[in-house]
Image: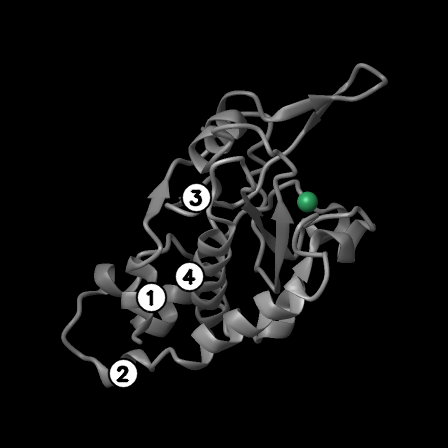
Amino acid sequence: MRRGELGESLGLEVELIDEGRPNRSGVPIRPEYLTIHNTSNTGSRADAKAHSKWVRKTGYYILRSGKKNWVSWHYTVDDMRVIQQLPASEKGWHAGKGNGVSLGIEICMHKEISQKAAYDRAARLCACLLYDFSLSVDAVVTHKHWTGKNCPVLLLKGNRWDKFRTSIEHYLNNITTESESTTETEEELAPIECTVKCDESYG
Ligand SMILES: [Zn+2]
Protein backbone atom coordinates (compact mmCIF):
# COMPACT_ATOMS: atom_id res chain seq x y z
CA MET A 1 0.00 0.00 0.00
CA ARG A 2 1.21 3.48 -0.75
CA ARG A 3 2.02 5.79 2.15
CA GLY A 4 -0.75 8.17 1.06
CA GLU A 5 -3.39 5.45 1.06
CA LEU A 6 -2.35 4.21 4.48
CA GLY A 7 -2.51 7.77 5.81
CA GLU A 8 -5.98 8.26 4.36
CA SER A 9 -7.18 5.11 6.12
CA LEU A 10 -6.49 6.68 9.52
CA GLY A 11 -9.45 9.05 9.58
CA LEU A 12 -7.11 11.77 10.79
CA GLU A 13 -8.62 14.89 12.29
CA VAL A 14 -6.48 17.80 13.42
CA GLU A 15 -7.54 19.53 16.63
CA LEU A 16 -4.40 21.24 17.86
CA ILE A 17 -4.11 22.64 21.37
CA ASP A 18 -4.24 26.43 20.98
CA GLU A 19 -0.85 28.11 20.82
CA GLY A 20 -0.14 29.95 24.03
CA ARG A 21 -1.92 27.38 26.20
CA PRO A 22 0.32 26.22 29.09
CA ASN A 23 0.49 22.71 27.60
CA ARG A 24 1.79 23.91 24.20
CA SER A 25 5.55 23.83 24.79
CA GLY A 26 6.50 25.48 21.51
CA VAL A 27 9.79 23.57 21.78
CA PRO A 28 10.93 21.99 18.51
CA ILE A 29 11.85 18.30 18.49
CA ARG A 30 13.00 15.80 15.95
CA PRO A 31 11.22 12.54 16.84
CA GLU A 32 13.37 9.45 17.28
CA TYR A 33 10.75 7.37 19.10
CA LEU A 34 7.01 6.84 19.26
CA THR A 35 5.79 6.49 22.85
CA ILE A 36 2.64 4.42 23.24
CA HIS A 37 0.10 4.99 26.01
CA ASN A 38 -3.31 3.67 26.95
CA THR A 39 -5.57 6.37 28.34
CA SER A 40 -6.34 4.29 31.48
CA ASN A 41 -9.86 5.72 31.13
CA THR A 42 -12.47 2.96 30.90
CA GLY A 43 -15.40 5.33 31.27
CA SER A 44 -18.33 5.39 28.91
CA ARG A 45 -17.65 7.56 25.82
CA ALA A 46 -14.06 8.35 26.92
CA ASP A 47 -13.12 8.23 23.26
CA ALA A 48 -10.64 10.19 21.12
CA LYS A 49 -13.06 13.11 20.83
CA ALA A 50 -13.43 13.32 24.61
CA HIS A 51 -9.67 13.13 25.22
CA SER A 52 -8.97 15.68 22.52
CA LYS A 53 -11.43 18.05 24.16
CA TRP A 54 -9.92 17.45 27.59
CA VAL A 55 -6.34 18.13 26.54
CA ARG A 56 -7.36 21.28 24.66
CA LYS A 57 -9.75 22.70 27.27
CA THR A 58 -8.20 21.43 30.51
CA GLY A 59 -4.88 19.64 30.00
CA TYR A 60 -3.71 19.33 33.59
CA TYR A 61 -4.04 17.22 36.69
CA ILE A 62 -3.91 18.63 40.18
CA LEU A 63 -1.01 17.14 42.09
CA ARG A 64 -1.21 16.36 45.80
CA SER A 65 0.84 19.49 46.38
CA GLY A 66 -2.01 21.43 44.80
CA LYS A 67 0.10 22.34 41.76
CA LYS A 68 -1.11 21.80 38.22
CA ASN A 69 0.65 19.10 36.23
CA TRP A 70 0.20 20.10 32.59
CA VAL A 71 0.19 17.32 30.01
CA SER A 72 0.00 17.03 26.24
CA TRP A 73 0.58 14.44 23.55
CA HIS A 74 0.49 14.24 19.77
CA TYR A 75 -2.18 11.76 18.69
CA THR A 76 -5.24 10.18 20.27
CA VAL A 77 -6.51 6.98 18.65
CA ASP A 78 -9.77 5.11 19.06
CA ASP A 79 -11.58 2.59 16.86
CA MET A 80 -13.07 5.32 14.64
CA ARG A 81 -10.45 8.01 14.17
CA VAL A 82 -7.07 9.55 14.95
CA ILE A 83 -7.04 13.07 16.35
CA GLN A 84 -3.86 15.13 16.33
CA GLN A 85 -3.27 17.53 19.23
CA LEU A 86 0.29 18.74 18.62
CA PRO A 87 2.45 19.23 15.53
CA ALA A 88 4.82 16.27 15.10
CA SER A 89 7.69 18.75 15.35
CA GLU A 90 6.81 20.02 18.83
CA LYS A 91 7.59 18.64 22.26
CA GLY A 92 4.71 17.23 24.30
CA TRP A 93 4.56 16.36 28.00
CA HIS A 94 3.64 12.71 28.33
CA ALA A 95 6.71 10.59 29.01
CA GLY A 96 9.26 12.20 31.33
CA LYS A 97 12.68 12.04 29.73
CA GLY A 98 11.05 10.70 26.56
CA ASN A 99 9.35 14.03 25.91
CA GLY A 100 12.26 15.59 24.07
CA VAL A 101 12.74 12.71 21.64
CA SER A 102 9.35 11.10 21.10
CA LEU A 103 5.83 11.57 19.84
CA GLY A 104 3.08 10.61 22.28
CA ILE A 105 0.28 8.36 21.06
CA GLU A 106 -2.67 7.73 23.39
CA ILE A 107 -4.83 4.70 22.61
CA CYS A 108 -8.32 4.83 24.08
CA MET A 109 -9.89 2.01 26.10
CA HIS A 110 -13.38 3.25 26.87
CA LYS A 111 -16.34 1.02 27.53
CA GLU A 112 -17.78 0.96 24.02
CA ILE A 113 -14.53 0.66 22.03
CA SER A 114 -13.52 -2.13 19.70
CA GLN A 115 -10.05 -2.49 21.20
CA LYS A 116 -8.84 -4.59 18.29
CA ALA A 117 -9.87 -1.93 15.79
CA ALA A 118 -8.18 0.76 17.88
CA TYR A 119 -4.89 -1.18 17.95
CA ASP A 120 -5.10 -1.74 14.22
CA ARG A 121 -5.63 1.98 13.62
CA ALA A 122 -2.78 2.84 16.00
CA ALA A 123 -0.52 0.36 14.19
CA ARG A 124 -1.28 2.07 10.88
CA LEU A 125 -0.53 5.47 12.42
CA CYS A 126 2.78 4.19 13.81
CA ALA A 127 3.74 2.72 10.43
CA CYS A 128 3.09 6.06 8.72
CA LEU A 129 5.13 7.98 11.28
CA LEU A 130 8.00 5.49 11.23
CA TYR A 131 8.05 5.74 7.45
CA ASP A 132 7.97 9.54 7.48
CA PHE A 133 10.78 9.82 10.02
CA SER A 134 12.84 6.94 8.57
CA LEU A 135 12.63 4.91 11.77
CA SER A 136 12.32 1.18 12.39
CA VAL A 137 9.77 -0.62 14.56
CA ASP A 138 12.40 -0.59 17.35
CA ALA A 139 11.60 3.10 17.73
CA VAL A 140 8.14 2.21 19.08
CA VAL A 141 8.38 2.13 22.87
CA THR A 142 6.09 2.10 25.87
CA HIS A 143 5.52 4.90 28.34
CA LYS A 144 6.92 2.40 30.87
CA HIS A 145 10.20 2.41 28.97
CA TRP A 146 10.80 6.04 29.99
CA THR A 147 9.36 6.31 33.48
CA GLY A 148 8.49 2.85 34.80
CA LYS A 149 4.78 3.70 34.89
CA ASN A 150 2.49 0.77 34.07
CA CYS A 151 1.45 2.25 30.72
CA PRO A 152 0.11 1.30 28.17
CA VAL A 153 -1.79 -0.64 30.79
CA LEU A 154 -3.63 -2.95 28.37
CA LEU A 155 -0.85 -3.49 25.87
CA LEU A 156 1.61 -4.54 28.57
CA LYS A 157 -0.54 -7.56 29.38
CA GLY A 158 0.37 -11.01 28.03
CA ASN A 159 1.83 -10.97 24.54
CA ARG A 160 -0.18 -7.96 23.34
CA TRP A 161 2.84 -5.68 22.99
CA ASP A 162 4.61 -8.19 20.75
CA LYS A 163 1.47 -8.58 18.64
CA PHE A 164 1.11 -4.81 18.36
CA ARG A 165 4.73 -4.45 17.23
CA THR A 166 4.27 -7.23 14.68
CA SER A 167 1.21 -5.47 13.31
CA ILE A 168 3.14 -2.19 12.94
CA GLU A 169 5.98 -4.01 11.22
CA HIS A 170 3.53 -5.61 8.83
CA TYR A 171 2.08 -2.26 7.78
CA LEU A 172 5.51 -0.61 7.60
CA ASN A 173 7.01 -3.36 5.45
CA ASN A 174 4.08 -3.16 3.06
CA ILE A 175 4.40 0.55 2.33
CA THR A 176 5.50 0.96 -1.24
CA THR A 177 7.86 3.79 -1.97
CA GLU A 178 6.20 6.97 -3.15
CA SER A 179 8.48 7.09 -6.19
CA GLU A 180 6.49 4.14 -7.54
CA SER A 181 3.54 6.50 -7.91
CA THR A 182 4.12 9.81 -9.58
CA THR A 183 0.65 11.26 -10.11
CA GLU A 184 -0.44 12.26 -6.60
CA THR A 185 -0.13 15.74 -5.25
CA GLU A 186 1.90 16.49 -2.18
CA GLU A 187 -1.26 16.95 -0.12
CA GLU A 188 -2.50 13.49 -0.95
CA LEU A 189 0.83 11.98 -0.05
CA ALA A 190 1.11 13.68 3.30
CA PRO A 191 -2.21 13.40 5.16
CA ILE A 192 -0.40 13.48 8.47
CA GLU A 193 0.60 16.96 9.51
CA CYS A 194 4.30 16.53 9.49
CA THR A 195 7.52 18.38 9.49
CA VAL A 196 10.32 19.49 7.25
CA LYS A 197 11.29 15.85 6.94
CA CYS A 198 8.15 15.12 4.91
CA ASP A 199 8.76 18.03 2.61
CA GLU A 200 12.26 16.75 2.03
CA SER A 201 11.20 13.25 1.18
CA TYR A 202 8.28 14.25 -1.01
CA GLY A 203 9.86 17.29 -2.60
ZN1 LIG B 1 1.15 6.70 29.50
The disc at residue 179 is 2
Q: Nearer the viewer, residue 203 or 141?
A: 141
Which of pointers 1 and 3 indicates the residue nearer the eye?
Answer: 1
Query: Quarter holding the C terminus?
Result: bottom left
**Front disc: 1 or 4:** 1
Mark 1 and mark 3: Cα distance apart in space: 16 Å
Crowding at mark 2 (Cα within 10 Å: few <14, some 14-19, many 20+): few
Q: Nearer the viewer, mark 3 or mark 2?
A: 3
Residue at screen point 37% across, 45% down: 80
Q: How is the image coloured?
A: one colour
In this orientation, which residue lies closer to the viewer: 20 or 43?
43
Gap between marks 4 and 2 measured at Cα: 18 Å
Decide: is 24 above or below 150: above
Q: Residue 134: image x %, image y %?
A: 50, 74
- Residue 106 bears which disc, if any? none
In the figure, is residue 167 to the left or right of 198?
right
Q: Earlier in the sequence, mark 4 or mark 3?
A: 3
